[in-house]
Image: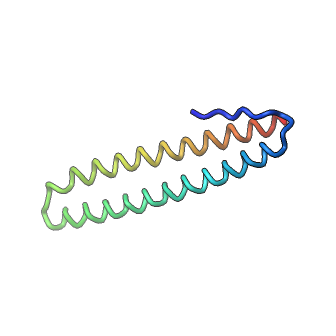
């Protein structure tokens, strides 16, 4: 995990860190939104396969959806922990 270790007196470093954090936060949220859309597409494909009695398709779509869910949860955990670390670092100044 990345830790934030900047000099306490440097105001420029603090601004850069907040800008980098905002950019990272936005990029990961866009990635999570994309993963959610893919999951919705997988659910629709699984439902279509179920209605067409194509049972062999259900297991791969379920496994793919679980993998995407775990990936999204991990990214969301990383964003919230990074935000917490950034806020704690800001309080020490």
Q: Nearer the viewer, residue 93 or 40?
A: 93
Q: Nearer the viewer, residue 37 or 25?
A: 25
Q: What percent of the width, then of the height, locates residue 31? A: 49, 56
Q: What percent of the width, then of the height, locates residue 42? A: 31, 60
Instruction: Tell me which residue sits at (84%, 39%) in the image.
Output: 10
| Quadrant including the C terminus | top right
Vertical relation: 81 (above or below) 35 = above
Vertical relation: 65 (above or below) 37 = above
Q: Is residue 54 left or right of residue 27?
A: left
Q: Is residue 50 left or right of residue 62?
A: left
Q: What percent of the width, then of the height, locates residue 27? A: 56, 55
Q: What percent of the width, then of the height, locates residue 4? A: 69, 35
Q: Nearer the viewer, residue 49 or 81?
A: 81
Coloring applied to the structure: rainbow
Vertical relation: 6 (above or below) 15 = above
Number of labels in the image equals: 0
Instruction: Tell me which residue sits at (13%, 61%) in the image.
Output: 54
Vertical relation: 77 (above or below) 48 = above
Residue projecting furthest to the right = 9
Q: Nearer the viewer, residue 62 or 81?
A: 81
Instruction: Tell me which residue sits at (61%, 43%) in the image.
Output: 80
Q: Is residue 13 left or right of residue 32?
A: right
Which quadrant would residue 17 be assigned to in this image? top right
Instruction: Tell me which residue sits at (71%, 40%) in the image.
Output: 86
| Quadrant including the N terminus | top right
């Amino acid at each position: 995990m990345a830790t934030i270790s900047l000099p306490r007196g440097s105001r420029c470093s603090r601004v850069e860190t907040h800008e980098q954090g905002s950019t990272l936060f936005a990029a990961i949220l866009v990635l999570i939104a994309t993963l959610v859309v893919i999951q919705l597409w997988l659910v629709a494909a699984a439902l279509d396969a179920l209605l067409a009695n194509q049972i062999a398709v259900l297991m791969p779509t379920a496994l793919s959806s679980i993998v995407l869910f775990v990936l999204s949860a991990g990214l969301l955990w990383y964003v919230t922990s990074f935000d917490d670390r950034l806020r704690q670092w800001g309080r020490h100044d």
